Amino acid sequence: MLYGFVAGVLAGNYDIVEVYIDGILKIGNHDMEGLGKILDQLDAVAGESIKMVVTVSADEDKLTDAVKKYL
């Protein structure tokens, strides 16, 4: 649902250059595997023209490789 929301906002507002998502683990029920997947999707929809900033409240050693590539 988060991806759909962000994609919809970006589709309806062509002048957005930055998106901030705070507390993404709360939104995703602390699912680290799911976090890696949603970050990949958000990266794809953002492309080169949109800066995507996401906060994750977790120890770095708890993050998966799919998440760490975005640090």
Image (cartoon, rainbow, N blue to C red):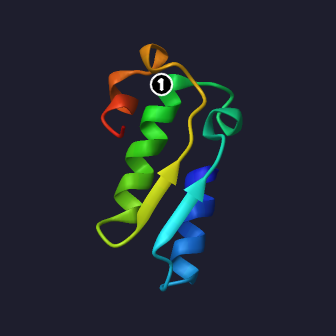
Check disc 1: other Cα within 10 Å, few if <14, some if 14-19, many if 20+.
some
Quarter where residue 45 is shown:
bottom left
In which quadrant is the C terminus drawn? top left
Locate residue 28, reporting x and y percent: 64, 34
User: Could you tell me which residue is drawn at 60 percent across and 30 percent down?
Assistant: 57
Left or right: 40, with 34 as reference point: left
Residue where numbered disc 1 is placed: 33
Please state which of residues 64 and 37 is positioned toward the viewer in this rendering. 64
Camera-nearest residue between 21 and 41: 21
The residue lying at 41 percent from left, 64 percent from top is: 51
Does residue 24 sit above or below 68 in this rendering? below
Left or right: 65, with 26 as reference point = left
Question: For the view shown, which residue lies furthest in the top direction?
Answer: 61
Q: Amino acid at mark 1?
A: Glu
From the viewer's perspective, tell me whether residue 23 is left or right of residue 20. Answer: right
The residue at 56%/42% (across/down) is: 55
Residue 56 at x, y = what percent?
A: 56, 35
Secondary structure type for disc 1: helix
Q: Is residue 44 above or below residue 63?
A: below
- Looking at the rendering, which quadrant does residue 39 occupy? top left
Q: Nearer the viewer, residue 70 or 46?
A: 70
